[in-house]
Amino acid sequence: MTTRRAACNCGQLHLTIEGEPVRISMCHCLECQRRTGAVISNQARFKREQITFAGAAAEWTRSADSGNSLTFRFCPTCGSTVYWTGESFPGLVAVAIGTFADPSFPAPTISVWEESRHAWVSPPSDPPPRRTAQQG
């Protein structure tokens, strides 16, 4: 079984994850762009029982454009968003792919909020399925 470690920038908040994600996706929504400071957000969703949580996490909750609530957990020391949960995916935890610091992490297979994708952002040469459904 695969074991992965995700951590914030300073290492204080970290996760140990057993097994494979149930979904790997990229999001182009404006809220994710604001949250990450990048033009795209990437996430891997895992079942909560696959994850061991360690370290202190601060929380911030917002409503998505879909109306669903999302709660983001980030390190109170360095501010890195490490993971989040949402009403639209109960029992699952989304983990920011960059927190794995693993260039061999599998590529996203789902892309959401395509209508907000920056025109100069090119999809991968073997792109994930295009999704126009607005999710949150």
Image (spheres, rainbow, N blue to C red):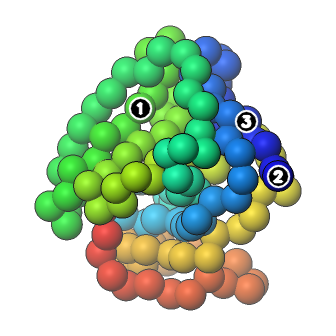
Amino acid type, callout 1: Arg
**Circle number at residue 5:** 3
Amino acid type, callout 2: Met
Spatial distance from mark 3 to mark 2, Cα to Cα?
A: 13 Å
Amino acid type, callout 3: Arg
**Is label 2 in a helix, a strand or a loop?**
loop
For marks 3 and 1, the one nearer the N-term is 3
Q: Which residue is mark 1?
A: 73
Spatial distance from mark 3 to mark 1, Cα to Cα?
A: 16 Å
**Circle number at residue 27:** none
User: The C terminus is located in which quarter?
Assistant: bottom left
Tell me the crowding category of disc 2: few under 14, some 14 to 19, or many 20 or more residues within 10 angstroms, Cα based.
few
Query: x%, y% of residue 81?
Result: 48, 34
Spatial distance from mark 2 to mark 1, Cα to Cα?
A: 26 Å
**Is label 1 in a helix, a strand or a loop?**
strand
Tell me the crowding category of disc 1: few under 14, some 14 to 19, or many 20 or more residues within 10 angstroms, Cα based.
many
Tell me the crowding category of disc 3: few under 14, some 14 to 19, or many 20 or more residues within 10 angstroms, Cα based.
some
Are the two marked residues, 3 and 1, in contact with CB atoms closer than 8 angstroms? no
Are the two marked residues, 2 and 1, in contact with CB atoms closer than 8 angstroms? no
Q: Nearer the viewer, residue 15 or 125?
A: 15
Q: Which residue is mark 2?
A: 1
Query: x%, y% of residue 11?
Result: 67, 19
For residue 47, above or below residue 111: above
Q: Nearer the viewer, residue 94 or 118?
A: 94
Q: Which residue is drawn at the image coordinates 85% and 56% (left, top)?
A: 104
Residue 100 visible in rendering: no
Q: Nearer the viewer, mark 3 or mark 2?
A: 2
Query: Would residue 32 be found to the left or right of residue 95 on screen?
Result: left
Query: x%, y% of residue 39?
Result: 50, 58
Query: Would residue 51 be found to the left or right of residue 86 on screen?
Result: right
Query: x%, y% of residue 40?
Result: 51, 60
Q: Which residue is drawn at the image coordinates 36% and 60% (left, top)?
A: 89
